[in-house]
Amino acid sequence: MMHGFTLSRKIRLSFWAAFGFGMLSFFAGAIFTPDRTWANLLVATYYLLGMGLAGLVFVALEYVTGASWSIAFRRVPEAMASTLTVASGAFLLVLLVSSSIYPWFGEAHEGGGTAWFRDLWLTPAFFIGRAVFFLAVWIIFARLIVRNSRLQDRDGEVSHTRKNIRLSAGFLVVFGITYWLAGFDWIMSLEPHWYSTIFSVYNFAGLFLSGLAMITLLAIWLERVGLFAGILNDEHLHDLGKLLFAFSSFWMYIWFCQYMLIWYANIPEETAYYVGRVGGFWGPLFLINLLLNWGVPFVVLLHVPAKRSRNIMLRVAAIILIGRWLDLYLMVFPPIVGERPVLGVL
């Protein structure tokens, strides 16, 4: 279906211009504000990694549930999953070079109580080793599942589907454990004295919601350039809309569970995470985050016609993708830049 397709000259020039501007801002930031620059790259590469994982999770769920409604655009989440190799390489490079943004990196162990386990877990070599292991496992599963799907296109053998069902079931179990630990490692350890047992579930909710938004956006775009013409129909769009609505509400549910329990318990070690984010200059972004990830999608997609409108679905998907970036920004930046958010060219 995608054979022979090339991006227009205008789009390719836009990509190269964005790349050039990004490199200039990176070098300027690395010289003048290195911590902020590496924090930006942590958000960007983690965002990209999440898109690849979301695509792979979507395909895996499709296989294990025997779903057929999404086969028409399966190549979209498969293509997203295929970016995992590049995304993983970029993310691992950021982890290796930007260790300074992790306050525990290179510090002496405190000891006492149960701190010994945290100190052991946050040993630099063990930290990087786990990251390499997690990324390698995800890449292997992605390559095997996508390869079997391509092979079935060539020879039509049902055995490839059976293999992918088994691989997908195994991946979902492994993903659940590894992504749970990765969320603790890569994001929560930016504030090593704060903890939340539901944090990785919250992270997954954002990952899958934004992944569904990206699938929706790409499917509609491919239809508009002619590749999905006559393939993507209103029923597909309606189902994607229902998933966006459902996982937007799921994201909000998990967000509320974490916030409400920490607020109600009122334990200083836990409330410190929200005290800095709710008040002051971070407060407006804190509220906008809820609006973008839940408020707008919930209100707009509550109506059936909205789920069947390509223009509305495109806008909602774009809003969710911006919301995911803001959500990650609020996780990463407060402990690095302090009381005031820093937004600008860099």
Image (spheres, rainbow, N blue to C red):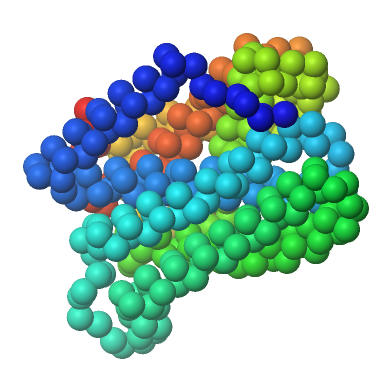
Q: Position of residue 234 (x, y in %)?
A: 80, 17
For the question of whether residue 273 can be seen, the reply is yes
Residue at horizontal 65%, vertical 67%?
174
x, y (%) of residue 111? 28, 86
Determine whether, in the image, residue 140 is placed left or right of residue 163: left
The front one of 319 and 17 is 17
Residue at image point 25% right, 49% down: 38
Tell me residue 256's x, y (percent).
55, 45
Q: Is residue 257 above or below residue 296?
A: below
Which picture quadrant has residue 97?
Answer: bottom left
Residue 322 is situated, as x and y percent measured from the top left of the image, at 46, 29
In this rendering, the answer to whether 62 lies above or below 111 is above
Q: Quadrant of residue 312?
A: top right
In this rendering, is residue 271 above or below 305?
below
**Does 151 appear above or below 120?**
above
The residue drawn where x is 31% and y is 74% is: 124
Residues 247 and 17: in front is 17
Q: Residue furthest right?
A: 158
| Residue in the foreground of this view, choosing between 308 and 55 | 55
